[in-house]
């Protein structure tokens, strides 16, 4: 299939618009934040979502993510299974029943680039997903690949990133997958 290309002044019909697969739902920029909250993000408009997250840090921090519903973070029932790799080793880990997704990691100053696909966050069913992270700091690059889940039937509407210490500066782009 050829991707649609639009020019200024074009009249777009339904077949043109229906060919677009990802729709930008929200862009949130934050600066020197220890907590980043984005509400009214997930709705019945889309079943699945992609989050692109980029942030920088000036010190060692261990950010985590929680899903939000009714204006507050949900702090239970998170599952994660991941593979980590750096310049010298590859290892894996698993957690169950955690208070968040501890998926960003980071030693020292650097940048984090992450892609998260969430499946059904606004459905009254378990939320699943995949996450890929490239974590650059100093002379080391760490890659993290995760399978994630939130085992409750809560209909989530947003996300929250928390840091254990220090601040982050960056952007979250959220896209809805056209089904």
Image (cartoon, rainbow, N blue to C red):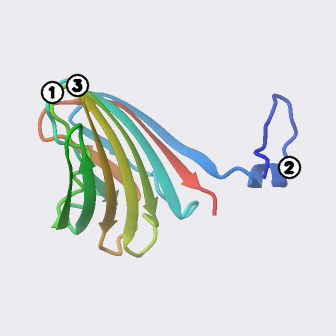
- Give the residue drawn at x 35%, y 51%: 159
Asked whether the beta carbons under mark 1 and mark 3 sit within 8 Å of each other, the answer is: no
Alpha carbon distance from label 2 to label 1: 50 Å
What residue sits right under mark 3 in the picture?
Answer: 139
Answer with mark 2 or mark 1, whichever residue precedes in sequence: 2
Residue bearing mark 1: 59
Disc 1 to disc 3, C-alpha distance: 15 Å
Q: Is residue 4 above or below residue 77?
A: above
**From the image, which quarter does the C terminus lie in?**
bottom right
Question: Which one is earlier in the sequence, the residue at label 3 or at label 2?
Answer: 2
Secondary structure of residue under mark 3: loop
Residue 49 makes an appearance in the image: yes
Give the x, y percent position of residue 150: 30, 67
Q: Nearer the viewer, residue 118 or 88?
A: 88
- Residue at position x 84%, y 44% in the image: 12
* Rendered position, 15 above or below 155: above
**Within 10 Å of the Cα at label 3, are there few (<14), some (14-19), or many (20+) other Cα atoms?**
few
Q: Residue at x 14, y 32 (%)?
A: 60
Q: Which residue in the protein does label 2 denote?
A: 13
């Amino acid at each position: 299939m050829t991707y649609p290309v639009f020019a200024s002044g074009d009249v777009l019909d339904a077949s043109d618009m229906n060919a677009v697969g990802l729709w930008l739902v929200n862009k949130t920029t934050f600066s020197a934040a220890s907590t980043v909250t984005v509400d009214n993000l997930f709705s019945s408009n889309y079943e699945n979502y992609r989050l692109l997250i980029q942030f920088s840090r000036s010190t060692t921090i261990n950010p985590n993510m929680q899903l939000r519903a009714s204006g507050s973070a949900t702090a239970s029932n998170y599952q994660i299974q991941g593979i980590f790799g750096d310049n010298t080793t590859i290892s894996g880990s698993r957690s169950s029943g955690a208070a968040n997704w501890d998926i960003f990691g980071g030693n020292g100053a650097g940048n984090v680039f992450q892609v998260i696909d969430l499946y059904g966050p606004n459905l009254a069913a378990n939320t699943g997903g995949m996450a890929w992270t490239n974590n650059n700091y100093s002379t080391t690059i760490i890659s993290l690949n995760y399978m994630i889940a939130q085992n409750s039937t809560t209909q989530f509407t947003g996300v929250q990133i928390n840091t254990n210490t220090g601040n982050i500066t960056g952007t979250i782009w959220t896209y809805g997958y056209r089904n």
